[in-house]
Image (cartoon, rainbow, N blue to C red):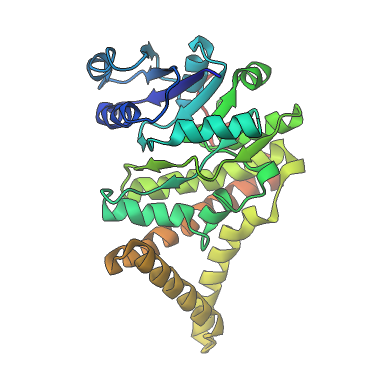
Protein backbone atom coordinates (compact mmCIF):
# COMPACT_ATOMS: atom_id res chain seq x y z
CA UNK A 1 0.00 0.00 0.00
CA UNK A 2 1.41 3.35 -1.06
CA UNK A 3 0.50 6.30 1.15
CA UNK A 4 0.13 9.88 -0.06
CA UNK A 5 0.13 12.41 2.79
CA UNK A 6 -2.13 15.32 1.81
CA UNK A 7 -1.57 18.57 3.71
CA UNK A 8 -3.33 21.85 2.85
CA UNK A 9 -1.76 25.03 4.21
CA UNK A 10 -2.85 28.64 4.32
CA UNK A 11 -0.41 31.34 5.49
CA UNK A 12 1.30 29.06 8.02
CA UNK A 13 4.82 28.22 6.83
CA UNK A 14 6.17 27.63 10.35
CA UNK A 15 3.57 24.94 10.95
CA UNK A 16 4.66 23.08 7.83
CA UNK A 17 8.26 23.16 9.04
CA UNK A 18 7.32 21.48 12.33
CA UNK A 19 5.13 18.91 10.58
CA UNK A 20 7.82 17.98 8.06
CA UNK A 21 10.38 17.67 10.85
CA UNK A 22 8.11 15.12 12.50
CA UNK A 23 7.83 13.17 9.23
CA UNK A 24 11.62 12.83 9.11
CA UNK A 25 11.45 10.97 12.42
CA UNK A 26 8.92 8.37 11.26
CA UNK A 27 9.75 4.73 11.95
CA UNK A 28 8.45 3.47 8.62
CA UNK A 29 10.53 1.52 6.10
CA UNK A 30 8.25 1.84 3.07
CA UNK A 31 8.12 4.64 0.51
CA UNK A 32 5.47 7.34 0.81
CA UNK A 33 4.91 10.77 -0.68
CA UNK A 34 4.03 14.13 0.84
CA UNK A 35 1.77 16.52 -1.08
CA UNK A 36 1.62 20.10 0.21
CA UNK A 37 -1.23 22.18 -1.21
CA UNK A 38 -0.80 25.93 -0.75
CA UNK A 39 -4.32 27.37 -0.72
CA UNK A 40 -3.70 30.82 -2.19
CA UNK A 41 -1.44 31.92 0.68
CA UNK A 42 0.21 35.33 0.69
CA UNK A 43 2.81 34.01 3.15
CA UNK A 44 3.97 30.98 1.19
CA UNK A 45 5.86 27.96 2.47
CA UNK A 46 7.64 27.01 -0.78
CA UNK A 47 11.09 28.02 0.54
CA UNK A 48 10.62 25.71 3.52
CA UNK A 49 9.41 22.86 1.29
CA UNK A 50 12.54 23.18 -0.82
CA UNK A 51 14.66 22.48 2.27
CA UNK A 52 13.07 19.02 2.57
CA UNK A 53 13.13 17.88 -1.07
CA UNK A 54 16.36 15.96 -0.58
CA UNK A 55 15.01 14.29 2.57
CA UNK A 56 11.38 13.48 1.67
CA UNK A 57 9.48 12.58 -1.48
CA UNK A 58 7.60 15.86 -1.43
CA UNK A 59 5.51 17.83 -3.91
CA UNK A 60 4.47 21.47 -3.62
CA UNK A 61 1.26 22.64 -5.31
CA UNK A 62 -0.07 26.19 -5.36
CA UNK A 63 -3.68 27.08 -6.17
CA UNK A 64 -6.15 29.92 -5.72
CA UNK A 65 -7.83 30.11 -2.33
CA UNK A 66 -10.90 27.87 -2.20
CA UNK A 67 -10.84 26.40 1.30
CA UNK A 68 -9.36 23.31 2.95
CA UNK A 69 -11.82 20.80 1.48
CA UNK A 70 -11.16 21.81 -2.12
CA UNK A 71 -7.42 21.94 -1.38
CA UNK A 72 -7.44 18.37 -0.09
CA UNK A 73 -9.34 17.29 -3.20
CA UNK A 74 -6.80 19.12 -5.37
CA UNK A 75 -3.98 17.24 -3.69
CA UNK A 76 -5.68 13.85 -3.90
CA UNK A 77 -6.44 14.33 -7.60
CA UNK A 78 -2.70 14.75 -8.24
CA UNK A 79 -1.32 12.29 -5.70
CA UNK A 80 0.19 8.96 -6.74
CA UNK A 81 -0.86 6.83 -3.80
CA UNK A 82 -3.69 4.35 -3.46
CA UNK A 83 -4.43 5.53 0.09
CA UNK A 84 -4.47 9.16 1.24
CA UNK A 85 -3.57 10.32 4.75
CA UNK A 86 -4.92 13.81 5.41
CA UNK A 87 -3.52 16.14 8.07
CA UNK A 88 -3.99 19.74 9.06
CA UNK A 89 -0.86 21.88 8.86
CA UNK A 90 -0.89 22.43 12.65
CA UNK A 91 -0.33 18.74 13.41
CA UNK A 92 2.81 16.93 14.53
CA UNK A 93 2.94 13.26 13.56
CA UNK A 94 4.23 10.66 16.07
CA UNK A 95 7.07 8.51 14.78
CA UNK A 96 5.01 5.29 14.97
CA UNK A 97 1.94 6.68 13.12
CA UNK A 98 2.45 5.11 9.66
CA UNK A 99 3.42 1.74 11.13
CA UNK A 100 0.22 1.62 13.19
CA UNK A 101 -1.99 2.66 10.27
CA UNK A 102 -0.31 0.21 7.90
CA UNK A 103 -0.72 -2.74 10.28
CA UNK A 104 -4.32 -1.80 11.09
CA UNK A 105 -5.32 -1.58 7.43
CA UNK A 106 -3.62 -4.89 6.65
CA UNK A 107 -5.48 -6.56 9.53
CA UNK A 108 -8.89 -4.94 9.16
CA UNK A 109 -9.08 -2.85 6.00
CA UNK A 110 -11.47 0.07 5.76
CA UNK A 111 -11.75 2.76 3.09
CA UNK A 112 -11.91 5.63 5.57
CA UNK A 113 -10.58 5.98 9.10
CA UNK A 114 -9.93 8.69 11.62
CA UNK A 115 -7.64 9.05 14.60
CA UNK A 116 -7.69 11.10 17.82
CA UNK A 117 -5.52 14.03 18.80
CA UNK A 118 -3.36 14.66 21.83
CA UNK A 119 -1.29 17.50 23.29
CA UNK A 120 2.48 17.60 23.61
CA UNK A 121 4.18 18.79 26.77
CA UNK A 122 5.57 21.72 24.77
CA UNK A 123 2.11 23.07 23.90
CA UNK A 124 1.01 26.33 25.53
CA UNK A 125 -1.33 26.26 28.52
CA UNK A 126 -4.23 27.55 26.44
CA UNK A 127 -3.56 24.94 23.76
CA UNK A 128 -3.64 22.21 26.40
CA UNK A 129 -6.89 23.58 27.85
CA UNK A 130 -8.52 23.70 24.42
CA UNK A 131 -7.24 20.21 23.69
CA UNK A 132 -8.86 19.03 26.92
CA UNK A 133 -12.20 20.59 26.02
CA UNK A 134 -12.13 19.06 22.54
CA UNK A 135 -11.12 15.54 23.57
CA UNK A 136 -12.29 14.86 27.14
CA UNK A 137 -15.02 12.37 27.97
CA UNK A 138 -16.58 15.17 30.03
CA UNK A 139 -17.42 17.21 26.93
CA UNK A 140 -18.64 16.82 23.37
CA UNK A 141 -14.99 16.13 22.58
CA UNK A 142 -15.50 12.67 24.01
CA UNK A 143 -18.33 12.03 21.57
CA UNK A 144 -16.25 13.33 18.70
CA UNK A 145 -13.24 11.29 19.75
CA UNK A 146 -12.86 7.73 20.87
CA UNK A 147 -16.29 7.09 22.35
CA UNK A 148 -18.29 7.06 19.12
CA UNK A 149 -19.47 3.74 17.76
CA UNK A 150 -16.68 2.34 15.66
CA UNK A 151 -18.92 1.33 12.75
CA UNK A 152 -20.34 4.86 12.47
CA UNK A 153 -17.33 6.91 13.44
CA UNK A 154 -17.08 10.26 11.64
CA UNK A 155 -13.37 10.90 10.98
CA UNK A 156 -12.11 14.48 11.24
CA UNK A 157 -9.92 15.87 8.51
CA UNK A 158 -7.04 16.94 10.78
CA UNK A 159 -6.24 13.20 11.03
CA UNK A 160 -8.02 11.13 8.43
CA UNK A 161 -7.37 8.32 5.96
CA UNK A 162 -9.25 7.85 2.69
CA UNK A 163 -8.70 5.26 -0.02
CA UNK A 164 -8.33 6.36 -3.63
CA UNK A 165 -11.32 4.17 -4.45
CA UNK A 166 -13.50 6.03 -1.94
CA UNK A 167 -12.22 9.39 -3.15
CA UNK A 168 -13.06 8.60 -6.76
CA UNK A 169 -16.52 7.38 -5.77
CA UNK A 170 -17.35 10.52 -3.77
CA UNK A 171 -15.16 13.15 -5.47
CA UNK A 172 -13.92 13.99 -1.99
CA UNK A 173 -14.93 16.87 0.25
CA UNK A 174 -17.82 19.23 -0.39
CA UNK A 175 -17.70 23.02 -0.20
CA UNK A 176 -19.01 23.47 3.35
CA UNK A 177 -16.48 24.38 6.05
CA UNK A 178 -16.45 23.39 8.81
CA UNK A 179 -18.51 20.23 8.48
CA UNK A 180 -16.88 18.92 5.30
CA UNK A 181 -15.48 15.85 7.05
CA UNK A 182 -18.69 14.45 8.62
CA UNK A 183 -20.49 15.34 5.38
CA UNK A 184 -18.03 13.16 3.47
CA UNK A 185 -18.44 10.35 6.00
CA UNK A 186 -22.19 10.29 5.50
CA UNK A 187 -21.88 10.21 1.71
CA UNK A 188 -19.45 7.33 2.11
CA UNK A 189 -21.98 5.44 4.24
CA UNK A 190 -24.67 5.99 1.62
CA UNK A 191 -22.39 4.40 -0.98
CA UNK A 192 -21.71 1.38 1.21
CA UNK A 193 -18.24 2.35 2.45
CA UNK A 194 -17.35 1.94 6.11
CA UNK A 195 -15.49 4.23 8.48
CA UNK A 196 -13.76 3.47 11.74
CA UNK A 197 -11.61 4.89 14.49
CA UNK A 198 -8.00 3.76 14.90
CA UNK A 199 -7.44 4.79 18.55
CA UNK A 200 -3.65 4.55 18.51
CA UNK A 201 -3.24 6.52 15.28
CA UNK A 202 -3.23 9.86 17.04
CA UNK A 203 -1.52 13.11 16.13
CA UNK A 204 -0.43 16.06 18.21
CA UNK A 205 -2.78 18.86 17.19
CA UNK A 206 -1.50 22.31 18.13
CA UNK A 207 -4.63 24.33 17.30
CA UNK A 208 -2.92 27.71 17.00
CA UNK A 209 -5.95 29.72 18.01
CA UNK A 210 -6.76 32.21 20.73
CA UNK A 211 -9.96 32.38 22.76
CA UNK A 212 -11.76 34.52 20.18
CA UNK A 213 -10.86 32.25 17.29
CA UNK A 214 -11.80 29.20 19.32
CA UNK A 215 -15.24 30.66 20.06
CA UNK A 216 -15.75 31.43 16.37
CA UNK A 217 -14.64 27.93 15.41
CA UNK A 218 -16.95 26.06 17.77
CA UNK A 219 -19.86 28.35 16.85
CA UNK A 220 -19.38 27.35 13.22
CA UNK A 221 -19.27 23.69 14.29
CA UNK A 222 -22.65 24.19 15.92
CA UNK A 223 -24.07 25.94 12.86
CA UNK A 224 -22.88 23.18 10.54
CA UNK A 225 -24.55 20.29 12.39
CA UNK A 226 -28.24 21.14 11.70
CA UNK A 227 -27.28 21.71 8.06
CA UNK A 228 -25.83 18.20 7.93
CA UNK A 229 -28.90 16.87 9.75
CA UNK A 230 -31.13 18.42 7.07
CA UNK A 231 -29.04 16.82 4.31
CA UNK A 232 -28.72 13.43 6.00
CA UNK A 233 -31.70 13.04 8.39
CA UNK A 234 -31.09 9.30 8.67
CA UNK A 235 -27.89 9.99 10.58
CA UNK A 236 -29.23 12.42 13.18
CA UNK A 237 -28.26 11.77 16.80
CA UNK A 238 -29.86 13.14 19.95
CA UNK A 239 -26.36 13.81 21.32
CA UNK A 240 -25.97 16.63 18.81
CA UNK A 241 -28.52 18.62 20.81
CA UNK A 242 -26.65 18.24 24.08
CA UNK A 243 -24.57 21.46 24.01
CA UNK A 244 -27.71 23.52 23.33
CA UNK A 245 -29.57 21.77 26.14
CA UNK A 246 -26.58 22.39 28.40
CA UNK A 247 -26.53 26.12 27.65
CA UNK A 248 -30.30 26.58 27.94
CA UNK A 249 -30.18 24.70 31.23
CA UNK A 250 -27.35 26.88 32.53
CA UNK A 251 -29.14 30.15 31.82
CA UNK A 252 -32.32 28.68 33.24
CA UNK A 253 -30.43 27.85 36.44
CA UNK A 254 -29.30 31.48 36.62
CA UNK A 255 -32.89 32.65 36.23
CA UNK A 256 -34.08 30.27 38.96
CA UNK A 257 -31.60 31.87 41.36
CA UNK A 258 -33.89 34.94 41.34
CA UNK A 259 -36.47 32.75 43.07
CA UNK A 260 -33.90 31.27 45.51
CA UNK A 261 -33.96 27.94 43.69
CA UNK A 262 -30.32 26.91 43.38
CA UNK A 263 -30.40 23.12 42.88
CA UNK A 264 -29.80 23.22 39.13
CA UNK A 265 -27.12 25.90 39.46
CA UNK A 266 -25.27 23.77 42.02
CA UNK A 267 -25.21 20.89 39.54
CA UNK A 268 -23.49 23.12 37.03
CA UNK A 269 -20.99 24.22 39.66
CA UNK A 270 -20.26 20.57 40.40
CA UNK A 271 -19.77 19.86 36.70
CA UNK A 272 -17.26 22.68 36.23
CA UNK A 273 -15.52 21.63 39.44
CA UNK A 274 -15.17 18.14 37.94
CA UNK A 275 -13.72 19.65 34.76
CA UNK A 276 -11.23 21.56 36.89
CA UNK A 277 -10.17 18.51 38.91
CA UNK A 278 -9.87 16.12 35.96
CA UNK A 279 -7.99 18.59 33.75
CA UNK A 280 -5.70 19.65 36.60
CA UNK A 281 -4.82 16.02 37.30
CA UNK A 282 -4.49 15.09 33.63
CA UNK A 283 -2.28 18.08 32.82
CA UNK A 284 -0.62 18.26 36.26
CA UNK A 285 -1.42 21.94 36.39
CA UNK A 286 -4.00 23.85 38.41
CA UNK A 287 -3.75 26.73 35.96
CA UNK A 288 -4.60 24.51 33.00
CA UNK A 289 -7.49 23.14 35.06
CA UNK A 290 -8.79 26.69 35.44
CA UNK A 291 -8.23 27.47 31.75
CA UNK A 292 -10.08 24.26 30.86
CA UNK A 293 -13.19 25.64 32.56
CA UNK A 294 -12.99 28.65 30.23
CA UNK A 295 -12.41 26.41 27.21
CA UNK A 296 -15.32 24.10 28.05
CA UNK A 297 -17.62 27.06 28.63
CA UNK A 298 -16.66 28.62 25.30
CA UNK A 299 -17.11 25.27 23.57
CA UNK A 300 -20.61 24.68 24.93
CA UNK A 301 -21.69 28.30 24.62
CA UNK A 302 -20.43 28.71 21.04
CA UNK A 303 -21.61 25.35 19.76
CA UNK A 304 -24.89 25.47 21.66
CA UNK A 305 -26.02 28.87 20.37
CA UNK A 306 -24.63 28.17 16.90
CA UNK A 307 -26.65 24.97 16.78
CA UNK A 308 -29.85 26.68 17.96
CA UNK A 309 -29.47 29.49 15.43
CA UNK A 310 -28.95 27.03 12.60
CA UNK A 311 -31.67 24.66 13.79
CA UNK A 312 -34.27 27.43 13.73
CA UNK A 313 -33.26 28.78 10.32
CA UNK A 314 -32.51 25.53 8.51
CA UNK A 315 -34.73 22.87 10.08
CA UNK A 316 -37.70 24.91 11.28
CA UNK A 317 -37.85 27.81 8.82
CA UNK A 318 -36.43 25.69 5.96
CA UNK A 319 -34.05 28.41 4.80
CA UNK A 320 -31.40 27.62 2.23
CA UNK A 321 -28.20 26.92 4.24
CA UNK A 322 -25.95 28.72 1.74
CA UNK A 323 -28.11 31.85 1.98
CA UNK A 324 -28.63 31.64 5.73
CA UNK A 325 -24.93 31.04 6.51
CA UNK A 326 -22.81 32.06 3.49
CA UNK A 327 -19.69 32.20 5.67
CA UNK A 328 -19.71 28.38 5.81
CA UNK A 329 -19.57 27.87 2.07
CA UNK A 330 -16.72 28.36 -0.38
CA UNK A 331 -17.53 29.04 -4.01
CA UNK A 332 -17.34 25.91 -6.10
Residue 329 in the image: above or below residue 53: below
Q: In the image shown, does 286 or 34 lie closer to the viewer?
A: 34
Vertical arrangement, residue 266 with respect to residue 173, above or below: below
Looking at the picture, tell me which residue is in the foreground, 253 or 324. Answer: 253
Looking at the image, how many numbered discs can be counted on the residues? 0
User: Picture quarter containing residue 142?
Assistant: bottom right
Residue 185 lies, in percent from the top left, at 64, 34
Residue at image point 72% right, 33% down:
189
Q: Residue at x 45, y 35 (%)?
A: 97
Judged left or right of residue 170, residue 86 is: left
Report x, y in % for residue 120: 32, 48
Q: Is residue 27 left or right of residue 197?
A: left
Q: Is residue 173 visible?
A: no
Which residue is at the far front? 29
256 or 214: nearer the viewer: 214
Image quarter where the C terminus lies is top right
- Residue 319 percent coordinates (x, y): 66, 38
Percent x, y of residue 71: 46, 20
| Residue 142 visible in rendering | yes
Of 242 and 118, the residue lying toward us: 118
Residue at the image point whose x is 64% and y is 44% from the top: 226
Residue at image location 53% in from the left, 77% down from the top: 253
Q: Is residue 323 left or right of residue 56?
A: right
Q: On the picture, is 5 further left or further right than 90?
A: right
**Compared with residue 270, is residue 220 higher up or lower down, i.e. above or below?**
above
Amino acid sequence: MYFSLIIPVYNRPNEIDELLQSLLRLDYNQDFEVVIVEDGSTDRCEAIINQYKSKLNISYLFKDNSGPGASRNYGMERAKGDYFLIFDSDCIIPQFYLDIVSRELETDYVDCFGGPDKALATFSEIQKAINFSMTSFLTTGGIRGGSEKVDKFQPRSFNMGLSKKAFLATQGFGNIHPGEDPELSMRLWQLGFKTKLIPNAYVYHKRRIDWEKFSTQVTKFGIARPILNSWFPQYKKYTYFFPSVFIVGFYSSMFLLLFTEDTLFKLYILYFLLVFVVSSAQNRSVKIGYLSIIAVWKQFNGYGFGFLNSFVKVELLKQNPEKAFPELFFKK
